[in-house]
Image (cartoon, helix red, strand yellow):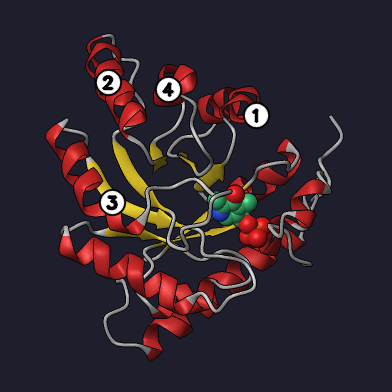
Amino acid sequence: MPSMPTLYPSIPRHLKAIDTLIKQEASLWPGTAQTIDIIAVSKQQPVEKILAAIDAGHKIFGENRVQEASLKWPSIKKNHNGITLHLIGPLQTNKVKEALMLFDTIETVDRPELAEQIAKHMPRLSARDQLTCHSFFIQVNVGGEPQKSGILPHQADDFIKFCKALQLPITGLMCIPPQNEAPAPYFALLATLAKRHHLPFLSMGMSHDYKIAVSLGATHVRIGTAIFGERMDSGAREKGLGTRD
Ligand SMILES: *Cc1c(COP(=O)(O)O)cnc(C)c1O
């Protein structure tokens, strides 16, 4: 058998550099998280690049669409132990069951109907030993933007209580602040909400703003292009979700 060439040497390099920057940033500020998980956002990235990250020892990944994730991840998870997959995009109620059997954390619980569907399916899947998802974050639309999903900040207190009453294991909050605005006040708002409800995890910060998020207490940063390079879909760039590598 011919030996495999080492593809994408930039990926382990990027992961290491980002990890170093995160640790440096965290050391500068009081109250930052003890451990900060890098969620490698692999949406619209080829499986070869994901495998390059796994070969480098990375274990935590994020996808934003159930359908795309269900094509890529079942076989990767089967062949590699200890992988954790986060759903970071909007979840339709008709895909809840599938998502609960594929992801380990759903970060985008954002409305009562979705919370109810999750609460309905969890015990059934658990009884059949098919449940993979044991942790949920609530997405907060910190900028109150109509085009973004997430519960509005003024409804967040009630919604968090609603989810807890449904016995959902809510462990954190997630946000995507408005583009073209300084993200710090939005990250700080998310941190305040989490603290008020004793939620340990804060998923905030992407390729262009993760250092600021870390300084404000992020426990999870979601980083795509700074690890993997440009995504295959050019539309992502127009939406402002892409940055140069
Ligand atoms: C795509 C995406 C990211 C990663 O964005 P990059 O700019 O590539 O780091 C993070 N969070 C969410 C919710 C995303 O959809």
Whole-percent x, y for residue 94 in the image: 47, 17
Amino acid type at circle 2 is Met
Amino acid type at circle 1 is Glu
In this orientation, which residue lies closer to the viewer: 162 or 24?
Answer: 162
Mark 1: few/some/many CA within 10 Å (<14, 14-19, 20+): few
Residue position marked by numbered label 3 in the rendering = 155
Q: Which mark is residue 122?
A: 2
Residue position marked by numbered label 1 in the rendering = 68
Amino acid type at circle 3 is Gln
In this orientation, which residue lies closer to the viewer: 70 or 173?
Answer: 173
Residue that appears at 46% across and 78% down: 184
Residue 200 horizontal side relative to residue 211, left or right: left
Image vertical order of residue 34 relative to residue 112, above or below = below
Q: CA distance from mark 4 to mark 1?
A: 14 Å
Q: CA distance from mark 1 to mark 3?
A: 31 Å
Q: CA distance from mark 3 to mark 2?
A: 25 Å
Q: CA distance from mark 4 to mark 2?
A: 10 Å
Amino acid type at circle 4 is Val
Are discs 4 and 2 less than 8 Å apart at CB?
Answer: no
Q: Quadrant of residue 188?
A: bottom left
Q: Earlier in the sequence, mark 1 or mark 2?
A: 1
Q: Which mark is residue 96?
A: 4
Q: Earlier in the sequence, mark 4 or mark 2?
A: 4
Q: Earlier in the sequence, mark 1 or mark 3?
A: 1
Secondary structure category for the residue under label 1: helix
